[in-house]
Image (cartoon, helix red, strand yellow):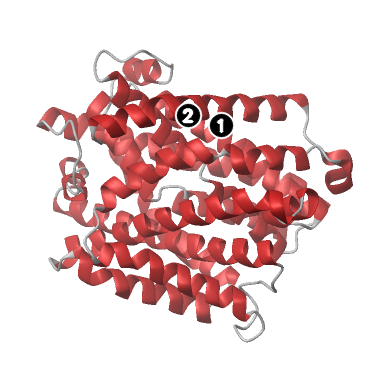
Amino acid sequence: MKKILEISLGIVTSVGGFLEIGSLATAAQAGSAFGLQLIWAIALGTICIIFLVEMAGRFAAVSGHTISDGIRERFGFNFFLLPFLSTLLLNLMVLAAETGGAAIALELATGIAFQWWALAVAFLAWLLLWKGTFGFIEKCVTILGLVTLCFVVAAVLLEPDLKAVAAGALPSIPQHDHASYWFMVVSILGASISPYLFLFYSSGAVEDKWDETYLGTNRAIAGLGMSFGGTISIAVLIVAALVLAPNGVDQITDYHQLSTMLVPVFGRWGYWLFVASLGIACFGAILELGLQQAYLAAQGLGWNWGEDRKPSEDPGFSAAYTLALLLAAIPIVFGFDPLNLTILSMALTAATLPLTVIPFLFLMNDERYVGKHGNGTISNSAVVLIIMLGSILAIVTIPLELLGGI
């Protein structure tokens, strides 16, 4: 019964946590600019995160290590330093984008400019991390995140052409703006397979004291949960393609343009459903990212760590998420555009993913850590191919898009 509950909570976690500001922004941008053509990119990213999350949970359950801890121990601190620093910096960019997203939601709700909300959002997140437990944060925020299912309902009620949806699930060559098209592919992959997702998952598995008896539970959470989350992202793309594009919104330059996405389906309640979805999804991601920054710092530097510990028992861990939340709020306070920050950080995430995933793949094939539960040919091949694709696309399209202007 306990494991069934874990599976249920894992699926709910995906529903509430998969759709954060990166997934929302990239899916909506893709739908408004290219219609249903980029459904395949979300599907590809979802397949990749299923593999990575399953691997992360299996590694934690069998070895008792988190991914960060395992990389540092297996390869040494000097090797670990590059993925450690790059992940910290990218996570900070994404955390700033999520803080901006939550602040934008509060601006939409109150009319008060988002810059004034950044520190308040950061303080509330810090207070929950300081006072809360891992279980409380995981369950409460993700259950509230069920509101994001409104995008799935809207996508169904808008009655999209199923043949066009099916065609969008297959890779295609764009008819216009080739650089922007492939840049969106890279951004979608970055949003779907951000390192913090599977790094956080491995830390959560250790926090929950998983062992080998949880391997079946882990597979169910990875497969069902991430697929459900990917479905929500595809729904956002469909809604954007059917609502924003026909109204002349083919380039999203501001989050305010997204606020009417759900209005044709739900009327005036659609506005508030969007605000709630944006605010809750972003705030949930802020808590996860704040924790992940603390996990990464503590595991990388050998400190005590654990959200269920009192701050006095792991002062370095607590100081890490405190500093991360503060630093992430600063650019938003000074009016940095959250949308540009989101799209760019997602693309850079895809480009730097190999720094974390390649050593992780070595760990998943090291019998000293995973014994007989190491990766098979399919898992290794799938992840390597997808990471190579993301890296090649990022190397080619990011410079082109930056030179042309995002």
The crowding category of the residue bearing disc 2, from other C-alpha atoms within 10 Å (few below 14, some 14 to 19, many at least 20), is many
Residue 121, image x and y in percent? 33, 71
Q: Quadrant of residue 36?
A: top left
Callout 1, which amino acid? Ile
Q: Secondary structure at mark 1?
A: helix
Q: CA distance from mark 1 to mark 2?
A: 6 Å
Q: Is residue 310 left or right of residue 119?
A: right
Q: Is residue 200 left or right of residue 95?
A: right
Q: Is residue 238 above or below residue 318?
A: above
Taking the spot 22% from the left edge, 30% from the top edge, the residue there is 242
Image location of residue 313, percent across then percent down: 67, 83
| On-image quarter of the C terminus | top left
Which residue is at a point 47% across and 51% down the rendered structure image? 90
Residue placed most toward the observer, 52 or 92? 92
Above-or-below relation of 328 to 311? above
Residue at image location 28% in from the left, 62% down from the top: 332
| Res 197 visible | yes
- Tell me what residue is drawn at x 54 percent, y 71 percent: 320
Residue 278 location in percent, x, y? Answer: 31, 55
Residue 328: assigned label? none
User: SS of the residue at dot 2?
Assistant: helix
Do callouts 1 and 2 mark residues in contact (Cβ within 8 Å)?
yes
The amino acid type, in three-letter code, at marker 2 is: Ala
Percent coordinates x, y for residue 120 in the rendering: 31, 75
Q: Which mark is residue 43?
A: 2
The total of numbered circles placed on residues is: 2
Viewer-side residue, 283 vs 154? 283
- Taking the image as shown, residue 4 lies to the left or right of residue 279, namely right
Q: Residue tagged by mark 1?
A: 47
Q: Is residue 396 above or below residue 305?
A: above
Label 1: few (<14), some (14–19) or many (≥20) C-alpha neighbours in 10 Å: many
